[in-house]
Amino acid sequence: MDYFDRFAIPHPSPAIYASMVAIGLTVVAIIFGLTYFKKWGYLWREWLTTVDHKRIGIMYLISALIMLFRGGVDAIMMRAQTAVPDNKLLDAQHYNEVFTTHGVVMIIFMAMPFIYALMNVVVPLQIGARDVAFPRLNALSFWLFFMGAMLFNISFVIGGSPDAGWTSYFPLAGNDFSQSVGTNYYMLSIQIAGIGTLISGINFTTTIFKMRAPGMTLMKMPMFTWTALITNAIVLFAFPVLTIALLLGTMDRLFGTNFFTMTNGGMDMLWANLFWVWGHPEVYILILPAFGIYSEVISTFSRRNLYGYKSMVGSIVIISFFSFLVWTHHFFTMGQGPLTNSIFSITTMAIAIPTGIKIFNWLLTMRKGSIKFTVPMLYSVGFIPIFTIGGVTGVMLGMASADYQYHNTMFLVAHFHYTIIPGVVFAMIAGLTYWWPKMFGFMLNERIGKWAFWFIAIGFNVTFFPMFFTGLDGQARRMYTYSEATGFGPLNMLSFAGAIVLMIGFALIVYNVYYSTRYASRNISADPWNARTLEWATHSPVPSYNFAITPQVNSIEALWDHKKKGQPLFSGPIEKIHMPNNSGVPFIMSCIFFVWGFSFVFSMWIPAIITTIGIFVCMAHRSFEKDDGYYISVKEIEDTEKECEVQSR
Amino acid sequence: MKTKLAFYSLVISIFAVLAGCEPVMVLDPKGPQAETTANVIWISIATMAFVVVVVFGMMAYIVFKYRASRQSPDYEPPHIEGNHLVESIIVGIPVLIIIFLSIVTVKSTYEVEATPKGYEDQKPLIVYASSSDWKWHFSYPEENIETVNYLYIPTDRPIEFRLYSYGPITSFWIPQLGGQKYAMSDMVTKLHLAATVPGEYMGRNANFSGKGFAENIFEVKAMPESEFDKWVEDVKSTAAPLSEEKFKELLEPGHLGQMTFSGTHLKFLPPPEGEHGGHNH
C-alpha cells in the first residue's frame, strides 16, 4: 500500500472530499450524457479534432471561464479566512495552497486562455484571413494548455496542491521545505501549458506577418491585431525563459540537481531573476491585448476613429521593449544596492509614459464622439479611472526607497489587482460581450450585462481599495491570519463583503449567458454594433471559411470606409477555397503529455519513458503524413452565403 | 457615471478619516530612514493625486458632454487623426513628472541604503539578524549576547543589521523604523536603521516562508543608550550560555517565544559572509 500513499491528500478536509465526490459525479454525468444523447461522434468530429480558429477560440473561452470560477472560489476562501482576526476556517497549509493556486490559475489558466480565446476568434477575421498560419499547431496549443490546466487542477484531489506561492521562490519551493508533490505539479503543468503558449506565439506572429488581406499594410492593421502581434512577440522572447526556469526547478526537485538550493553552490536568487524575467513581460502579455480590445470598443461606441493611431502603435512597441527591462523591481529588497535599484526604478516609472499616452488617446477618442453606453463600453469607461489608480500606485511602487515599505504587503496586492482586474478581466468581459454575436450569432442581454457591470465595478473597489490602507499599516500579504491587536479586522471584513458583491456580479454574467442563449433573437445582422473593422464584414456566426471572397483593404478602418465612403471591400468572383483537414493527433498527443506530466509529478519512470516515446511517435507521424487539406466548392460557398443572408434577415 | 464618482469620493473620504484618526504604521515613522520613506510616499501620493484628478476630471467631462443621448440623432462625429501639439503635451507632462519622481527616488534610495543622515560619525551597533523557520535570532557580536524573537536597540545610534537565513528567503521589516530587506541563506545583506523615539515597535518577516509565516513576528524595543547598556549587562550576568547543540535545537521548525542567551552562535556557525559566503568558488 505504501506505493499508493503518495497519491493521498496530505491535508484532507471535508471540502476536499466533497470536491472529490463532485468531480467524480460530474465525470460520470458527462460520460452518461454523451452516451445517452449519442454525442461522442459529434464531440470528436466537431470539437476534439477541429483546427478551425473560431472553434478553438470558443474552447479556450469555455476553459477560461471555468478556470475563472475555480480561481474565484479560491479568492472567496481567502477573503473569508482573513475577514476576521484569528479565524480558524482554513489552517495555514490549506490557506497557502489556496493562494498559490489562486495566483497560478488566474494568471496561467484564466487570463492566458482568455486572451488567446479572443485572439483566436478575432485576429484572423480582422486581417481577412481564412485561418491562422498553422491551424493544426493551433489545435496543439489549445490542447496542451488544456491538459496543463487539468493536470494542475487534479493536484488538490491527488497528492496535494503547490504551496509556495505563485512565484514559487526557492528554497521554499525546494524539496526541503515543500515536501508534497504540489510543486512538482506547478513545474510540470505550467511547463506543458507554456509550451502551448510558445507555439501560439510563433503561430500568431506568423499569421499576422504573412496572412493579412491584400492592401493591409502593418500601419493599416486594426489596433487589436497590433496588440496581438506585439503580445505574441513578447511571448516569443519571454516564454523560453520560463521553460528553462521550470526545467531547472524540475531537475532540482526530481533529480537532485543544485541550481536553486541552499547548499552546494545553488543560488536561490537565480530563480527569482529567471522567474521575473519571464514574469514581468507576462504582465504585458496580459495587458496589451486588453488595450487592443479597449481601442476597438471605445472607437466603435464613440463612433469615431481611434485618436492618435500612430502614437498608440508606438506606445505598445515601447511598452513591449521596456517590459524586459524592469524585472528587478519585483525584488528591490534583495540587496542589489542603490545603483541597480535606481536604474530599475527609472525604467519602471518610464513605462507610465507610453501607458499614459494610451489613456489620453482613449479619452481624446471619446471627445467629439457620440458615446453609447453599451455593456462593452461600460467596462471600457470603467476601466479608465480604475486602471489609473492601478497605474499611479504602480509608479509609487516603482520608487525603490518607498517600495522597501510597500514590498510584500497588501498595498502591492491592491495595486496589482487594480491593474489586472480592470486591465484583463474587464477587457475580457468587454471583448466577450462585444464579439459574442460574431462567435455565436446572438447578442448577450444588455440589461443583465449592465447589472453585472455595476456589481463587479463596485464589488471590486470595495474589495481592493481597503488593502492599500492595511498594506501601509503593516499587513503583509499571504498571512493566513492576524491577531485582533493589529487592527486589520474591519478593513478585511469590508474586503470580504466586496468579494461577495464581486461574486454576485460574475454569477450574473453566467446567468446572462444562460438567459441570452435561451431567449435572445437569432436574427442579427453581420454588424450589430455598427463597428469599423473587418471581422464585422462577414456573417454572424462566421462560416467556416470566414470570407467568401478575400477582402481588399485600403484604410485602417476598412469596413467603416466601406460603409461610409463606399470603398469596395469584396470584389471578384467566388472561387473554391482551400481548407485544412481536421486532425485527432493534437488531442491525442496532448493526452499523452498529460500522462507524461503526471508520471513526472510522481516520479513514475516507466510510464514517463513510454509517454516520452509516445510524444515522439506523434511528431514522427505528422512528419510522414501526407495531408493536403481539402477544397470547398464554389457551389457550396454560394449555398452557405445564401443561407447566412436568409438567417440574418 | 455620477453614482460611480459619488461612490469614489465617499470611499476616499471614509478612508481619509480613518487614516487621520490613527496614522498607518508606514506613515508614522520613529526613525530617520522611515521618515525619509514616509516623505517620499507623501510626495508620490501628492503627485499622483494630481494625475488622478486630471484624468478623472477629463473623463467625467468628456463622458458627460459627448454621450449620445445629449446629441441630435444626425450628429456625425468627425474624423481626427491626431494633433502634434496635443500629443506633445500628453507625452511632455508625464515625462516631467517621471523626471521629478526619478530624482526623488534616486536621492532617497541612496539615503536609506546608507548610514542614516546625521549619524555618520557614530559607531554603529552591529546586529546579526538571522531567520529560521519561523523565528528570528538576533546576535550582538560586540556585546556577546543573543536573543530570539525580540530585539532591544538603543535610540539615537545607527544600527547596522546583517541579515541572513537558515531556510527560505525571509524579509526583515520594522515598518516604523524603515523599509525591509531580504535575508537569504547564501549571502549576508545589510540594512541600516536608527530609532529616534523610545518605544515598542512591530517587526516581522514580510516574505512568505511557509506554514508558520503569519506568526513570524518579533518585538522591537528602542530605549535610551544607558538603559540598553544596563540590559546588556543584565543579560550577560543572568542568561544561560548558548551552546551549539542548543542552537541546533532552536533551528528546528516551530515557534519559540522570546529567549535570551549569553554568547552568540556566530562563533560556531559563521554567517554566510566573506569566506563563508555561498558563492566563493
Image (cartoon, coloured by chain):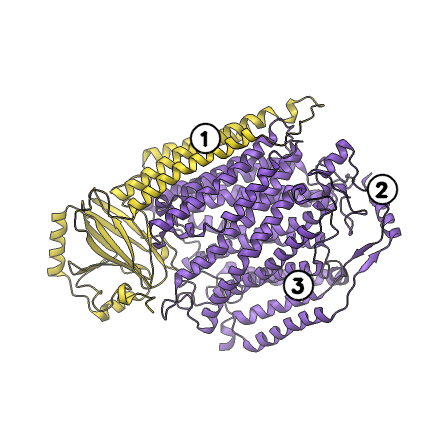
Chain colours: A purple, B yellow
Q: Amino acid at mark 3?
A: Val
Q: Is residue A604 left or right of residue A536?
A: left
Mark carried by residue A276: none
The percent coordinates of residue A501 (x first, y second) are: 53, 41
Q: In the rendered structure, the residue with mark 3 lies on which chain?
A: A
Residue at the (57%, 60%) spot, across then down? A194
**What residue is shown at x 65% (from left), y 26% (from top)?**
B68
Disc 2 residue type (three-letter)? Val
Does B3 sit left or right of A535 as displayed?
left
Q: Nearer the viewer, residue B244 or A397?
A: A397
Label 3 close to label 2 by CB (< 8 Å): no
Q: Are marks 1 and 2 in contact (CB under 8 Å)?
A: no
User: Badge 1, how many Cα within 10 Å: few under 14, some, many 20+?
Assistant: few
Q: Say yes or no: labels 1 and 2 on the same chain.
A: no
Disc on res. A28: 3
In the displayed structure, A621 sits above or below A196; it is below
Dot 2: few (<14), some (14–19), or many (≥20) neighbours within 10 Å?
few
Q: Position of residue A25 (x, y in %)?
A: 63, 61
What is the distance, in whole Å, between disc 3 and disc 2 at their CAs?
41 Å
Q: Helix, strand, or loop for circle 2?
A: helix
Query: Are dots 3 and 2 on a single chain?
Result: yes
The residue at which mark 2 appears reads as A646
Mark 3 vs mark 1, CA separation in Å: 50 Å
Where is residue A619 drawn, in percent x and y? 67, 69
Label disc, if present, on residue B10 of the rendered structure = 1
Q: Chain of mark 2?
A: A
- The answer for how far apart the CA atoms under marks 1 and 2 are is 53 Å
Crowding near the residue tagged with mark 3, few <14, some 14–19, many ≥20 C-alpha atoms within 10 Å: few
Please tell me which of labels 3 and 2 falls first in the chain. Answer: 3
